[in-house]
Structure formats: C-alpha cells, structure tokens
Amino acid sequence: MPIETTASVVAGVPDGAELLAVPYTSELVPAVELDLPVPLPGLLAHYEAKGEVGEIIEVPVAREDGVGRVLLYGVGDGSPKALRKAAAGLTRRARGRDELTVVVPEGDATAFAEAALLAAYSFRIGAPGKTPVRALRFVSADERAVRRGETVAQAVALARDLANTPSSVKTPAWLAERAGEQGVPVRVWDEEELQAAGFGGILAVGRGSANPPRLIQLSYVPEGPAERHVVLVGKGITFDSGGLSLKPTENMKTQKTDMAGGAVVIAVIGALARMGAPVRVTGLVAAAENMPSGTAQRPSDVITHYGGRTVEVLNTDAEGRLVLADALAYADAELDPDAVVDIATLTGAISVALGRNVGAVYSTDDDLAKGLLAAGRDSDDRLWRMPLIDEYAPALDSPIADLANVESGSTYGAGSITAALFLREFAGGRPWAHLDIAGVGRSTVDDGILTKGATGFGVRVLLEWLTRG
Ligand code: BES
Ligand code: MN
Ligand code: ZN
C-alpha cells in the first residue's frame, strides 16, 4: 500500500490546529503564538528537556472551542540525520489522528518530510491496524523540497510493498506486471525467450518452480540530454526456499523478500521518471522462484550463462549470483553502460559482518565507490565499502567448469566477498558496484522510519546517487 498520509505546505499555523508540533530551538519558538499554559523556559526546565532528538513534550493548550495540543520537539544538532529521527518520532506520536501541523526546523526539509512520511508506512492484508496520521501539514516549508521528500518516500514504500507481498501472489510474471506500471517502456523475456537468448542462469534457478522465470528490463531515457547511462541490476528471487539445497523453516520464512533488490530497481526507475532526472537508467530485474521439485536443478549440475561462461552449481541456495550473472553479462554485451550497479539480498554472511543498519558496497572503481558512499551518508541508506580480495578468487575454481557457484571446502570463507568476486567475473571490466543488502533489507522492529518487514533499503541511496552525484 502506498503511504496514505498526505503532505501539504501551509503558509502559517492554521487557526485551531488540533495538534501542532514546534521545534524548541530558541529562534523558532517565538515565531509562533503557542498559548502555552506555562512560559516555555519553565516548561522545558520542568521536563528537563535538553533539545535532544527524540524528545517530545506534549502540552495541552486552550483552543477556542476545546483543548488542543502542542508537541514541543527536540532537533539535536539539526543535521539531516537528526531531522529524520525527529520527524519520524512526530508522525508516530500522531498515530490515529486526522492531522498534524508541523513547524519545520531550519535545515533539510526534504529529509524531514521524507522521514515524516516513511514513519507512516504500513503493510497489512485484511483489517487495518492502528491507522497512521491522515494528513501532515508543513508550515512555511519549501514546497519543492517537501515534494522531493514525498516522491522518495513513496518510492521506498513501493519497494517495501513489493517485498512484503506474499510469494503466493508475487510470481515473476506478477513482478513484471508491476514493473510495467512505472511509466517507462518495459521489455519482458518469458521462458522461451530466455531460452532462445541463452539466459542459462535465470532458467536454471527458475526450473523447479511452477511459476516460470522472467527477465524484466525497464528503460528510463530523459527528455533532454543524458549525463550518463547507468544500468541497475536487481536480484528478483520471488521466493528463496534454497531449492534442493533446502533451507530450514526458520531461515526460509523471511525469503519472500529475496527480490528486495529487484523491487528497489523498479521503484527507483519509477521515481526517476516522475522527477524527470537528467540521467539515462536501464533497470534489469532477474526474476525467478527458487523451489525444489522434480524439475529443479541439482547440486553438481553445470549451467551455461548468457555469453557462454559455464558454472558448476554446488549449492542451489547460492542462486542469487546465478540470476545476476546472466543480467550482468547481458548489460555488458548489449547495453554499453558507463557504470553498472547491482543490488541484491545476496548473503547471510554480510549481516554477520555489517549487521542490520549498514549495507555493503563492493566496487572495481574507486570513484564509483566514493560516489555511492557519499550518497549513502546523505540519504541515510548507509553503506560500508568491502574489499574484493583477489587472493580469495581460487575459492570459486571448478575442476569441470569455468567457475563454481560456491566454495566447495572452507579454505577461504568470506561468504559475501566470494559472492562479490563471482559477480565481478560477469561485469566485463566496466565500472561496477555491487550492493549486498541481505542484512539491511528487512527490519525486525517498528522504529523511526522503519516498519517490521521490508525496508526498501537502496531506494534512497540510489536516487541520491543518480540525481545528485
Ligand atoms: N537469499 C539468501 C541470502 C539471505 C539470507 C538473504 C538471509 C536474507 C536473509 C541467499 O540466496 C542465500 O541463500 N545465500 C546463502 C549462500 C550460501 C549457500 C553460499 C547464504 O547466505 O547462506
Ligand atoms: Mn539462496
Ligand atoms: Zn537468495
């Protein structure tokens, strides 16, 4: 479900605002007539308010025909990060209300509006839970900044919705239909077309499922001249059971979100089209359902990828790299991009390394890595650069094929790094980056801008990188 809370900009505090949030920085408070029952300094002292982010003091005030409330909120150092946290806290505090009027603090109004809206996100099938605040009114904020924040937040919400949708609904063909709704031309390869073109990795992973695989291409071309051509590749495993290398239930039950990378690609391209961004971006979503069955691929099978490289499949649960390899090889051979960035819930190992709040970026190109890291800092989708350690490459040697999809022993370990090394083989020496979002793709808590389930991680950093870098 898209975020249903509306955002508007108002010139001043509307009369009789039922719920009014005001930052308690010294310059801003006197600008608004608050009708506080106790003078502000005394009030702040009483609550020992320090102005920290997350502090919200609720004060009842007399209104013409009843009681209204003022929420005095802290903004910390006023940085975008602090404003996001403050904004998300306000939206959560206003849950169940019709509206919240917010006097916005100095600083990044885009970040503030984006986080205020994201905190209103929810995904439910059936009866609604406690409904988020219906309307947010931002007082005297820059309209364009608020609209950009709204566009970004809705793109994150779309990525979350796609990933939160149960896999019984979310087949590869269903995902292709959703891609077709983004306002850009879409090309979809069905099974026969995948076969004819030689996409052996996508076909092998999809073979076990009753829901056949698809390769989905979305093309955003700006109206004016394009600064560059970027290809985004997303892992689109609509359910990852592990295949014949079956996962235990505990690990399997989160795997409807194994297309989170593909969801990010679809949502980013839709948002670029809405913004009219001056960059050409082609999205590729390699979509398949990884299931065990009599037609499934087996550990020990050898497959042939797009472009002819052969891979010995030693573990059918290392399926993401197989579908991505085809798409990367196709991008290199057919699309002539200036840079390729893939995004994938690729390895459990990366959440051991970086945890749940920071995503991994691997890159063959220092400028590309720097640009993504900076965009990650600014957009709050934080990234950490991981090394492509060449000495570990022999982990993927196969005695019978060009490569193996996993290490057969445990000489090298480094599961996320070796997965990245595997992908690098298919990027054709172009500037390439790989985002491993297995750790950050899902949240276990409702907190701040996050809601339990899919996070949409990657939408904000890629939009930031593509439109500001
Ligand atoms: N989709 C999983 C990775 C994953 C794990 C994502 C947990 C989100 C949460 C991926 O396809 C996978 O199964 N990876 C294996 C690789 C292994 C077989 C080399 C893993 O991480 O265990
Ligand atoms: Mn897997
Ligand atoms: Zn997977």
Image (cartoon, rainbow, N blue to C red):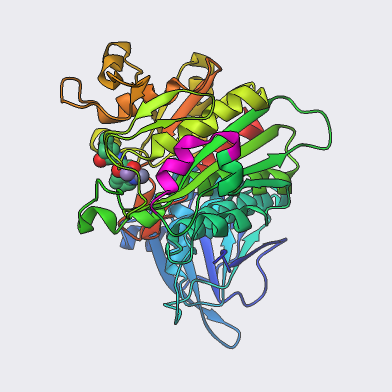
Q: Quadrant of the C terminus?
A: top right
Residue lying at 27% horizontally and 11% vertically, measured from the top left: 391
Would residue 222 be found to the left or right of residue 103 on screen?
right
Magenta range is 196-208
Residue 334 image point, x, y percent: 65, 26
Would residue 329 be found to the left or right of residue 316 on screen?
right
Would residue 268 be found to the left or right of residue 381 on screen?
right
Residue 157 image point, x, y percent: 53, 57
Would residue 64 be found to the left or right of residue 292 on screen?
right
Q: Say which quarter of the image contains residue 465.
A: top right
The answer to whether residue 439 is visible is no
Residue lying at 46% horizontally and 23% vertically, measured from the top left: 309
Of residues 351 and 63, the one drawn nearer to the viewer in this rendering: 351
**Residue ranking furthest to the top:** 391
Q: Quadrant of the N terminus?
A: bottom right
Residue lying at 29% horizontally and 35% vertically, measured from the top left: 350
Majority secondary structure in the magenta region: helix
| Vertical placement of residue 464 versus 151, above or below | above
The answer to whether residue 139 is visible is yes
**Residue ranking furthest to the left:** 410
Residue 250 image point, x, y percent: 21, 57
| Residue 206 forms part of the magenta stretch | yes
| Residue 389 forms part of the magenta stretch | no
**Ligand 1 sits in which quadrant?**
top left
Of residues 141 and 246, the one drawn nearer to the viewer in this rendering: 246
Q: Say which quarter of the image contains residue 333.
A: top right
How many marks are shown on the rendered structure?
0
Residue 265 image point, x, y percent: 56, 43
Residue lying at 57% horizontally and 41% vertically, measured from the top left: 194
Of residues 81 and 440, the one drawn nearer to the viewer in this rendering: 440
